[in-house]
Image (tube, grey):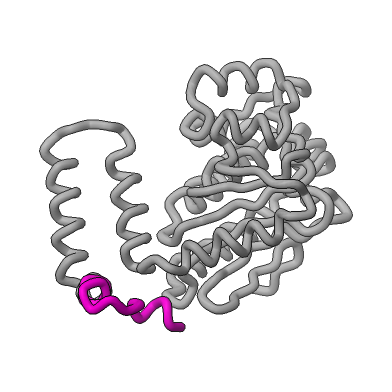
Amino acid sequence: MTYQEIQLERNNGIATLWLNRPEKNNAFNALVIKELIHALNQLKEDTQSKLVVLRGRGKHFSAGADLGWMKDSAQLDYQANLADSHELGELMHQLYQLPQPTLAVVQGAAFGGAVGLIACCDMAIGAQDAIICLSEVRIGLAPAVISPFVVKALGERQARRYALTAERFSGETACQLGLLNQCYPAAELDQACESWLANLQLNSPQAMQATKALLIKVETGKLDAATRLATEQTIAALRVSPEGQEGLTAFFEKRSPSWQEK
């Protein structure tokens, strides 16, 4: 598939997924959603891409839904709108459950559904002066499809506040709320991204994927027999795996493991 609205770059085990509509402030429409889903399905099967970064070209991460797309959607019936919302839901679930660790890098504006994209990533960093807003209620809508992921990222109390008030908040506030893990001066954001990726590349790719999958399983906090079994199976499988054996051997031999030498 040739992408028109996004870009997918692969370099040294890192895949960068770019929203590429800077002239539209990276607002997304049906085609953007379709292309992102296609790219995520590709990455899910890509054993060479160990980390995935989500970014926006230009001044803004994403202004949320494209106004023209929303205007057209308003003319559609319920079933057609349900199909549209299903595609957006598919995008969010694919991003949230992608096997590889994901890092969102946020600059400028991140409105509406773009907040959902950030919340679906495992980690997120951003500019201190970024402007973030769950803006849907201002135009008679709701942050519906993204709401489960926003609640996970912000917590229920803060999600209620910002979804109901549509207040704008800064990157610094987003850090305090937990939507962003860390924020930086805008001029230092690219360098910070490189630093985060360099640190992640020190880790076993297999172990990171196994850890992510396990955390998704245990996120409900249930201490039942199935959860206990999943934790026990995960560590046992990693200990006997080639990467697990290599990591333990390298540790005891006081050398770097093979994945750090690439």
Left or right of residue 230: residue 178? right
Tell me where residue 132 appears, x and y as whole percent. Answer: 72, 34
Q: Residue at x 62, y 29 (%)?
A: 143
Viewer-closest of 9 and 139: 9
Q: What stretch of residues is rendered in magenta? A: 246-262
Say whether residue 254 is magenta. Answer: yes
Q: Residue at x 75, y 26 (%)?
A: 168
In the image, residue 29 lies in the stretch drawn in magenta: no
Q: Position of residue 130 (x, y in %)?
A: 75, 40
Which residue is at 64% across, 38% downward? 115
Q: Is residue 137 visible in this depiction of the protein?
A: yes
Vertical placement of residue 19 versus 84, above or below: below
Query: In which quadrant of the rendered view does residue 57 lie?
Result: bottom right
Residue 120, image x, y percentages:
52, 44
Residue 180, above or below 160: below
* Residue at the extreme right: 23
Residue 76 visible somewhere in the drawing: no
Q: Is residue 244 above or below residue 229?
A: below
Locate residue 181 relative to residue 138 in the image: left or right: left
Query: Where in the figure is residue 162, as x and y percent of width and height?
Result: 64, 21
Res 71 → quadrant: top right
Q: Could you tell me which quadrant the N terminus lies in?
A: bottom right
Q: Residue at x 43, y 51 (%)?
A: 97
